[in-house]
Image (cartoon, rainbow, N blue to C red):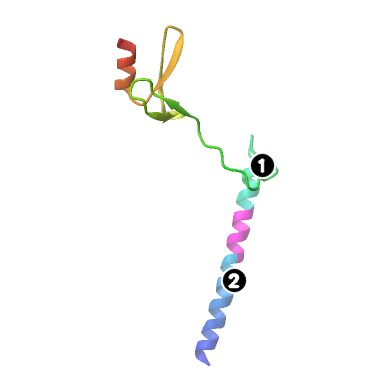
Amino acid sequence: MKPVIILILVFFAVRLLKKNLQKKAASMGAAEAHKPGGSRIPNKGAEPRGEEMVLDPVCGSYVPESSALSASRDGKTAHFCSTECRDKFLKG
């Protein structure tokens, strides 16, 4: 009889925990939708958009645009993965 009672208590504890997690997830989704620039209508099934990658012309690697270093030469802006690549580009 004791194992049956324990099993019933565990069952209800899991259900309660699951319900609370679902509420928390729903409230976080609603908060995200009301942020400036956020969509009020969830875009179900859509792929999340990533950050644009830029090509380093010196070493050929791709770098996220937000973390890339940039420099201009002859009116053209280029993006770089490191200061070494940027300096090589500016020298020659």
Give the SS element for disc 1.
loop
Q: Which mark is residue 34?
A: 1
What residue type is disc 1 on? His
Mark 2 or mark 1: which comes first in sequence?
2
Q: Is residue 12 left or right of residue 82?
A: right
Q: Give percent across and percent down for residue 51.
A: 50, 33
Q: Give percent across and percent down for residue 81.
A: 36, 26
What separation in Å lies between label 2 and label 1 (alpha carbons)?
A: 29 Å
Mark 1 crowd level (few <14, some 14–19, many ≥20, 10 Å Cα) = few
What residue type is disc 2 on? Arg
Q: Residue furthest top?
A: 74
Q: Give percent across and percent down for residue 75.
A: 46, 8
Residue occupying the point 56% across, 73% down? 13
User: Residue 60's image quarter?
Assistant: top left
Residue under label 2, please give it.
15
Q: Give percent across and percent down for residue 54.
A: 45, 26
Q: Residue furthest right?
A: 41
Q: Which mark is residue 66?
A: none
Say if the magenta span includes residue 32: no
Q: Which residues are magenta?
A: 19-26
Image quadrant holding the C terminus, namely top left
22 over 56 or under it: above or below? below
Residue occupying the point 45% across, 15% down? 77
Instruction: Give the camera-side residue of 38 and 79.
Output: 79
User: Residue 9's image quarter?
Assistant: bottom right
